[in-house]
Image (cartoon, rainbow, N blue to C red):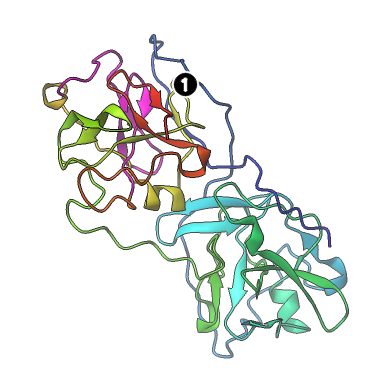
Protein backbone atom coordinates (compact mmCIF):
# COMPACT_ATOMS: atom_id res chain seq x y z
CA UNK A 1 0.00 0.00 0.00
CA UNK A 2 1.13 3.61 -0.48
CA UNK A 3 0.96 4.85 3.09
CA UNK A 4 4.21 6.20 4.46
CA UNK A 5 4.76 4.97 8.00
CA UNK A 6 7.43 7.43 9.01
CA UNK A 7 6.37 10.47 10.97
CA UNK A 8 7.62 13.65 9.30
CA UNK A 9 8.27 17.06 10.73
CA UNK A 10 4.84 18.64 10.46
CA UNK A 11 4.25 19.78 14.03
CA UNK A 12 2.21 22.85 14.78
CA UNK A 13 4.67 25.80 15.04
CA UNK A 14 4.13 28.27 17.85
CA UNK A 15 5.96 31.49 17.08
CA UNK A 16 6.20 34.73 19.04
CA UNK A 17 7.41 38.01 17.55
CA UNK A 18 9.78 39.74 19.95
CA UNK A 19 12.22 42.58 19.64
CA UNK A 20 15.76 41.43 18.94
CA UNK A 21 17.47 40.00 21.99
CA UNK A 22 20.52 37.85 22.60
CA UNK A 23 18.67 34.63 23.18
CA UNK A 24 20.61 31.44 23.75
CA UNK A 25 21.25 29.22 20.75
CA UNK A 26 23.47 26.49 22.13
CA UNK A 27 21.44 23.64 20.67
CA UNK A 28 18.91 24.96 18.18
CA UNK A 29 16.76 22.65 16.07
CA UNK A 30 14.91 23.24 12.79
CA UNK A 31 11.47 24.78 12.31
CA UNK A 32 8.30 23.00 11.20
CA UNK A 33 4.77 24.25 10.56
CA UNK A 34 1.25 22.91 10.21
CA UNK A 35 -2.20 24.51 9.71
CA UNK A 36 -4.19 25.65 12.72
CA UNK A 37 -7.82 24.74 13.47
CA UNK A 38 -10.93 26.87 13.83
CA UNK A 39 -14.01 26.98 16.05
CA UNK A 40 -16.36 24.00 15.69
CA UNK A 41 -19.86 24.44 14.29
CA UNK A 42 -22.09 21.49 15.24
CA UNK A 43 -24.99 20.49 12.99
CA UNK A 44 -27.66 17.83 13.26
CA UNK A 45 -29.44 15.51 10.88
CA UNK A 46 -32.20 13.04 11.66
CA UNK A 47 -30.92 10.12 9.59
CA UNK A 48 -27.52 9.78 11.19
CA UNK A 49 -25.82 9.94 7.80
CA UNK A 50 -25.91 13.69 7.24
CA UNK A 51 -27.44 13.39 3.74
CA UNK A 52 -28.76 16.57 2.21
CA UNK A 53 -26.22 18.71 4.06
CA UNK A 54 -25.05 20.14 0.71
CA UNK A 55 -22.50 19.10 -1.86
CA UNK A 56 -20.01 21.81 -0.94
CA UNK A 57 -16.66 21.80 -2.67
CA UNK A 58 -15.79 18.12 -2.29
CA UNK A 59 -16.57 15.29 -4.67
CA UNK A 60 -17.90 12.25 -2.90
CA UNK A 61 -17.56 9.57 -5.55
CA UNK A 62 -15.14 6.83 -4.58
CA UNK A 63 -13.37 7.18 -7.93
CA UNK A 64 -12.65 10.85 -7.18
CA UNK A 65 -11.40 10.20 -3.64
CA UNK A 66 -8.31 12.26 -2.81
CA UNK A 67 -5.40 11.27 -0.62
CA UNK A 68 -4.74 13.14 2.61
CA UNK A 69 -1.04 13.68 1.87
CA UNK A 70 0.92 14.95 4.88
CA UNK A 71 -1.40 14.74 7.87
CA UNK A 72 -1.27 17.45 10.52
CA UNK A 73 -2.59 18.04 14.03
CA UNK A 74 -4.56 21.26 14.43
CA UNK A 75 -5.60 22.75 17.79
CA UNK A 76 -9.26 23.64 18.15
CA UNK A 77 -10.78 25.66 20.99
CA UNK A 78 -13.79 23.37 21.36
CA UNK A 79 -12.41 20.00 20.26
CA UNK A 80 -8.78 19.96 21.36
CA UNK A 81 -6.47 18.30 18.81
CA UNK A 82 -8.03 17.54 15.41
CA UNK A 83 -6.49 15.51 12.59
CA UNK A 84 -6.36 17.29 9.22
CA UNK A 85 -5.14 16.57 5.71
CA UNK A 86 -2.23 18.39 4.07
CA UNK A 87 -4.51 21.29 3.09
CA UNK A 88 -5.75 21.75 6.67
CA UNK A 89 -9.20 20.20 6.09
CA UNK A 90 -10.66 18.33 9.06
CA UNK A 91 -10.91 14.52 8.85
CA UNK A 92 -13.98 12.78 10.27
CA UNK A 93 -15.08 9.33 11.44
CA UNK A 94 -18.55 7.76 11.30
CA UNK A 95 -20.18 5.94 14.22
CA UNK A 96 -21.88 3.46 11.85
CA UNK A 97 -18.51 2.28 10.56
CA UNK A 98 -16.44 -0.29 12.44
CA UNK A 99 -12.75 -0.33 13.34
CA UNK A 100 -12.31 -4.02 14.23
CA UNK A 101 -12.57 -5.12 11.52
CA UNK A 102 -12.27 -1.92 9.51
CA UNK A 103 -15.41 -1.36 7.44
CA UNK A 104 -17.01 1.68 5.82
CA UNK A 105 -20.80 1.91 5.80
CA UNK A 106 -20.88 5.18 3.87
CA UNK A 107 -21.58 4.72 0.15
CA UNK A 108 -23.64 6.41 -2.55
CA UNK A 109 -25.26 9.66 -1.38
CA UNK A 110 -23.43 9.36 1.93
CA UNK A 111 -20.06 9.39 0.16
CA UNK A 112 -21.15 12.48 -1.79
CA UNK A 113 -21.76 14.41 1.40
CA UNK A 114 -18.77 12.81 3.13
CA UNK A 115 -15.98 12.42 0.53
CA UNK A 116 -13.80 9.39 1.17
CA UNK A 117 -10.12 9.95 1.97
CA UNK A 118 -8.10 7.72 -0.33
CA UNK A 119 -5.42 5.52 1.21
CA UNK A 120 -2.77 6.70 -1.25
CA UNK A 121 0.22 8.76 -0.23
CA UNK A 122 -0.67 9.51 3.41
CA UNK A 123 2.05 10.39 5.94
CA UNK A 124 1.57 10.51 9.70
CA UNK A 125 1.66 13.88 11.44
CA UNK A 126 4.45 14.74 13.84
CA UNK A 127 3.45 13.59 17.32
CA UNK A 128 1.18 10.90 15.90
CA UNK A 129 1.82 7.15 15.98
CA UNK A 130 2.46 6.21 12.33
CA UNK A 131 1.41 2.63 13.07
CA UNK A 132 -2.20 3.88 13.44
CA UNK A 133 -2.43 4.53 9.71
CA UNK A 134 -3.97 1.77 7.61
CA UNK A 135 -6.44 1.14 4.81
CA UNK A 136 -9.72 -0.64 4.15
CA UNK A 137 -11.00 -1.98 0.83
CA UNK A 138 -14.41 -0.46 0.02
CA UNK A 139 -17.27 -2.22 -1.75
CA UNK A 140 -16.16 -0.77 -5.09
CA UNK A 141 -12.62 -2.12 -4.61
CA UNK A 142 -11.02 1.27 -3.84
CA UNK A 143 -8.87 1.72 -0.75
CA UNK A 144 -9.77 4.18 2.02
CA UNK A 145 -7.43 5.61 4.66
CA UNK A 146 -8.04 4.42 8.22
CA UNK A 147 -6.78 5.79 11.54
CA UNK A 148 -6.72 3.23 14.35
CA UNK A 149 -8.97 1.13 12.12
CA UNK A 150 -11.59 3.87 11.58
CA UNK A 151 -12.23 4.92 7.95
CA UNK A 152 -11.82 8.69 7.58
CA UNK A 153 -13.67 11.23 5.46
CA UNK A 154 -13.87 14.93 4.66
CA UNK A 155 -17.13 16.92 4.88
CA UNK A 156 -18.47 18.59 1.73
CA UNK A 157 -19.59 21.71 3.65
CA UNK A 158 -16.11 22.40 5.00
CA UNK A 159 -15.03 25.03 2.49
CA UNK A 160 -11.75 26.16 4.01
CA UNK A 161 -8.92 24.88 6.16
CA UNK A 162 -9.88 24.67 9.83
CA UNK A 163 -13.65 24.30 9.26
CA UNK A 164 -15.31 21.72 11.52
CA UNK A 165 -18.88 22.00 10.20
CA UNK A 166 -19.26 18.21 10.19
CA UNK A 167 -18.81 17.89 13.94
CA UNK A 168 -21.85 16.21 15.50
CA UNK A 169 -23.87 15.92 12.27
CA UNK A 170 -26.63 13.35 12.75
CA UNK A 171 -25.13 12.49 16.11
CA UNK A 172 -22.85 10.08 14.24
CA UNK A 173 -20.13 12.15 12.57
CA UNK A 174 -17.21 13.46 14.57
CA UNK A 175 -13.84 15.06 13.93
CA UNK A 176 -11.03 12.54 14.31
CA UNK A 177 -8.31 12.96 16.92
CA UNK A 178 -4.70 11.97 16.11
CA UNK A 179 -5.22 8.64 17.92
CA UNK A 180 -8.30 7.80 15.82
CA UNK A 181 -10.73 8.52 18.64
CA UNK A 182 -13.39 11.24 18.53
CA UNK A 183 -11.76 14.63 19.03
CA UNK A 184 -12.48 15.98 22.50
CA UNK A 185 -10.83 18.66 24.54
CA UNK A 186 -8.91 17.01 27.41
CA UNK A 187 -10.21 17.62 30.89
CA UNK A 188 -8.29 20.11 32.96
CA UNK A 189 -5.73 18.42 35.22
CA UNK A 190 -6.28 18.49 38.99
CA UNK A 191 -4.96 21.58 40.73
CA UNK A 192 -1.22 21.34 41.05
CA UNK A 193 -0.86 18.39 38.66
CA UNK A 194 1.63 19.21 35.94
CA UNK A 195 1.33 22.91 36.71
CA UNK A 196 4.04 25.27 37.83
CA UNK A 197 3.31 26.54 41.32
CA UNK A 198 4.69 30.04 40.92
CA UNK A 199 8.33 29.20 41.60
CA UNK A 200 11.33 27.59 39.98
CA UNK A 201 14.25 26.21 41.95
CA UNK A 202 17.25 23.94 41.50
CA UNK A 203 17.28 20.35 42.75
CA UNK A 204 19.96 17.66 42.74
CA UNK A 205 19.55 14.21 41.25
CA UNK A 206 22.10 11.35 41.48
CA UNK A 207 22.14 10.99 37.69
CA UNK A 208 21.10 14.40 36.39
CA UNK A 209 22.93 16.58 38.86
CA UNK A 210 21.61 20.13 39.28
CA UNK A 211 18.35 20.55 37.37
CA UNK A 212 15.36 22.90 37.42
CA UNK A 213 12.14 21.93 39.20
CA UNK A 214 8.91 23.83 39.78
CA UNK A 215 7.54 24.88 43.16
CA UNK A 216 6.06 21.40 43.65
CA UNK A 217 9.44 19.79 43.07
CA UNK A 218 8.38 18.46 39.66
CA UNK A 219 11.16 18.19 37.08
CA UNK A 220 11.18 20.84 34.33
CA UNK A 221 11.99 19.77 30.75
CA UNK A 222 12.94 21.17 27.36
CA UNK A 223 11.88 19.88 23.92
CA UNK A 224 14.77 19.60 21.43
CA UNK A 225 12.77 20.68 18.34
CA UNK A 226 12.00 24.03 20.04
CA UNK A 227 14.13 27.06 19.20
CA UNK A 228 15.30 29.98 21.33
CA UNK A 229 15.52 32.60 18.60
CA UNK A 230 12.98 33.06 17.33
CA UNK A 231 11.32 31.71 20.46
CA UNK A 232 9.27 28.80 19.11
CA UNK A 233 7.47 25.92 20.81
CA UNK A 234 6.92 22.88 18.61
CA UNK A 235 4.76 21.22 21.29
CA UNK A 236 1.04 21.74 20.67
CA UNK A 237 -2.25 19.87 20.93
CA UNK A 238 -1.81 16.36 22.33
CA UNK A 239 1.82 17.16 23.03
CA UNK A 240 0.86 19.92 25.48
CA UNK A 241 -1.64 17.56 27.12
CA UNK A 242 1.32 15.32 28.05
CA UNK A 243 3.89 18.08 28.53
CA UNK A 244 2.10 21.03 30.19
CA UNK A 245 3.76 24.39 29.70
CA UNK A 246 5.36 26.04 32.73
CA UNK A 247 3.37 29.15 33.58
CA UNK A 248 5.24 32.47 33.97
CA UNK A 249 7.26 32.76 37.16
CA UNK A 250 8.55 35.95 38.72
CA UNK A 251 12.32 36.27 38.68
CA UNK A 252 12.26 36.71 42.43
CA UNK A 253 10.86 33.17 42.67
CA UNK A 254 13.54 31.62 40.46
CA UNK A 255 16.24 30.52 42.87
CA UNK A 256 19.64 29.55 41.49
CA UNK A 257 18.54 29.88 37.85
CA UNK A 258 20.17 32.10 35.24
CA UNK A 259 18.20 35.33 34.80
CA UNK A 260 19.55 36.09 31.31
CA UNK A 261 16.67 36.29 28.80
CA UNK A 262 14.18 35.08 31.39
CA UNK A 263 11.24 35.86 29.10
CA UNK A 264 7.60 34.82 28.67
CA UNK A 265 6.35 33.23 25.42
CA UNK A 266 2.86 34.29 24.28
CA UNK A 267 1.46 31.20 22.59
CA UNK A 268 -1.29 31.34 19.92
CA UNK A 269 -3.37 28.93 22.02
CA UNK A 270 -3.67 31.70 24.63
CA UNK A 271 -1.26 30.18 27.14
CA UNK A 272 1.73 32.08 28.45
CA UNK A 273 4.87 29.98 28.84
CA UNK A 274 7.99 30.58 30.90
CA UNK A 275 11.32 30.36 29.12
CA UNK A 276 14.81 29.95 30.55
CA UNK A 277 17.46 31.67 28.45
CA UNK A 278 14.69 31.93 25.81
CA UNK A 279 14.02 28.16 25.75
CA UNK A 280 10.35 27.17 26.42
CA UNK A 281 10.04 24.85 29.43
CA UNK A 282 7.50 22.18 30.41
CA UNK A 283 6.63 19.59 33.03
CA UNK A 284 5.62 15.96 32.32
CA UNK A 285 2.34 14.29 33.29
CA UNK A 286 4.22 11.00 33.61
CA UNK A 287 6.00 12.39 36.68
CA UNK A 288 3.66 11.59 39.57
CA UNK A 289 5.61 12.96 42.51
CA UNK A 290 8.40 15.37 43.32
CA UNK A 291 11.78 14.03 42.23
CA UNK A 292 10.44 11.88 39.37
CA UNK A 293 12.40 12.17 36.13
CA UNK A 294 10.32 9.87 33.93
CA UNK A 295 10.40 12.38 31.08
CA UNK A 296 14.19 12.29 30.76
CA UNK A 297 15.20 11.16 27.27
CA UNK A 298 11.63 10.40 26.10
CA UNK A 299 11.66 10.03 22.32
CA UNK A 300 15.22 11.28 22.25
CA UNK A 301 13.76 14.79 22.36
CA UNK A 302 12.80 15.58 25.96
CA UNK A 303 15.44 16.38 28.57
CA UNK A 304 15.76 17.97 31.99
CA UNK A 305 17.04 21.53 32.14
CA UNK A 306 20.23 22.77 33.77
CA UNK A 307 20.18 26.04 35.79
CA UNK A 308 21.69 27.85 32.76
CA UNK A 309 18.86 26.66 30.49
CA UNK A 310 20.90 24.01 28.67
CA UNK A 311 19.76 20.43 28.11
CA UNK A 312 20.92 17.69 30.45
CA UNK A 313 21.32 14.77 28.06
CA UNK A 314 22.73 12.20 30.49
CA UNK A 315 20.46 9.15 30.82
Q: Position of residue 218 (x, y in %)?
A: 23, 42
Q: Is residue 279 left or right of residue 86?
A: left
Q: Quadrant of the C terminus?
A: top left
Q: Position of residue 32 (x, y in %)?
A: 59, 34
Relative height, residue 279 to residue 83 (above, below): above
| Relative image position of residue 153 (x, y in whole percent) | 68, 69
| Label 1 packing within 10 angstroms: few (<14), some (14-19), many (20+) | some
Q: Residue at x 43, y 29 (%)?
A: 313
Residue bounds of the magenta highlight: 255-284
- Tell me, yes or no, whether the highlighted magenta stretch contains residue 60: no
Q: Depth check: 205 or 295 in front?
A: 205
Q: Is residue 258 above or below residue 281?
A: above
Q: Secondary structure at mark 1?
A: loop
Tell me if I can see residue 200 in this picture: yes
Q: Quick check: 213 above or below 173? A: above
Of residue 189 and residue 57, the one placed in the foreground of this image is: 189
Relative horizontal placement of residue 116, taking residue 311 as reference (left or right) = right
Image location of residue 113, percent across then percent down: 70, 75
According to the picture, the residue beneath numbered tag 1 turns out to be 230
**Magenta stretch mostly in which secondary structure?**
loop
Q: Let me know if residue 275 is in the magenta part.
A: yes
Q: Residue at x 16, y 22 (%)?
A: 251
**Residue ID at (34%, 52%):** 286
Amino acid sequence: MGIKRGTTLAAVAVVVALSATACGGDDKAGDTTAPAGAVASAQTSGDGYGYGEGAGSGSGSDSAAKSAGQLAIAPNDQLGSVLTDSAGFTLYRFDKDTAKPSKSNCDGDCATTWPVVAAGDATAAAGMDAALLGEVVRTDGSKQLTVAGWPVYRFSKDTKAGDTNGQGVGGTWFAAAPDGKKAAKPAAPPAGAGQASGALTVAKDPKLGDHIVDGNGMTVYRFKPDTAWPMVSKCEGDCVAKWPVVAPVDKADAKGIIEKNYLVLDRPDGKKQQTVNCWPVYTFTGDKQAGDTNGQGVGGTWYAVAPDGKLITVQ
